[in-house]
Image: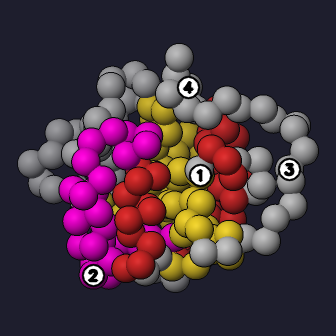
Amino acid sequence: MSGFAEYQPGVARQTVDVQVRPGELRDLDACAELIVSRTHGSAAERRERLVADLADPDKYISVAVVGDEVVGYGGVIRHELKPDDPPTTAPTGYYLIGLIVSPDWRRHGIGELLMRDRIRWTAERADAVYSFVNQANGAILDLNKRFRFTEVTRDFIFPGAPLKPGTCVLLRADLTDQ
């Protein structure tokens, strides 16, 4: 059991009217619930972190909304390599994090819409974007490939992320040709 949604490449997508936009304060309860549905922990604590993220110009929250319901979340953070970080620490740059779509809304293209929005935001600030993905998450690996991410390494650490050695791949996309 990988903990990720069952990946079914080739299954037809269902059409639905989805709005993807920057996250707002009113969205954060739903975003926190989506995040803890995957990572566990406290929704209240996660919401506090999201409130801080909204105020940080180096972070971005993207939400997918159907009607009044937040059905997807994705974030972008800026990571700054510090001089005393171990040599295998992920490089400085913007990172796509936490792409989560509510189970009832998967296979509607929402992940792709959230990816486009986060890349759009990042391209206004940088020439490249990074992502780190669990090797068992075929859906996200495939999505990253469609956006021309290429593998950087599998031997890395990312401060504050609960990465188990050898389970994730660090990816990078050049945004000058997206």
The amino acid on which the numbered mark 4 sits, given as a three-letter code, is Ala
* Residue 42 drawn in magenta: yes
Q: Are marks 4 and 1 in contact (CB under 8 Å)?
A: no
The residues bearing labels 3 and 4 have C-alpha atoms spaced at a distance of: 22 Å
N-terminal label among 3 and 1: 3
Colouring method of the image:
secondary structure
Which numbered marker is on residue 89? Answer: none
Q: Which portion, as a residue range, is magenta?
A: 36-62
SS assignment at label 4? loop
Q: Dot 2 corresponds to which residue?
A: 55
SS assignment at label 2? helix
Q: Quadrant of residue 61?
A: bottom left
Q: Quadrant of the C terminus?
A: bottom right
Categorize mark 3 by other alpha carbons within 10 Å: few (<14), some (14-19), many (20+). few
Which numbered marker is on residue 101? Answer: 1
Q: Are marks 2 and 4 in contact (CB under 8 Å)?
A: no
Which numbered marker is on residue 136? Answer: 4
The residues bearing labels 1 and 2 have C-alpha atoms spaced at a distance of: 23 Å
Categorize mark 2 by other alpha carbons within 10 Å: few (<14), some (14-19), many (20+). few
Foreground of the two, 90 or 95 = 95
- Give the main secondary structure of the magenta stretch: helix
The residues bearing labels 2 and 3 have C-alpha atoms spaced at a distance of: 35 Å
- Residue 168, given in percent of the width and then of the height, sits at 45, 31
Residue positioned 27% across, 78% down in the render:
56
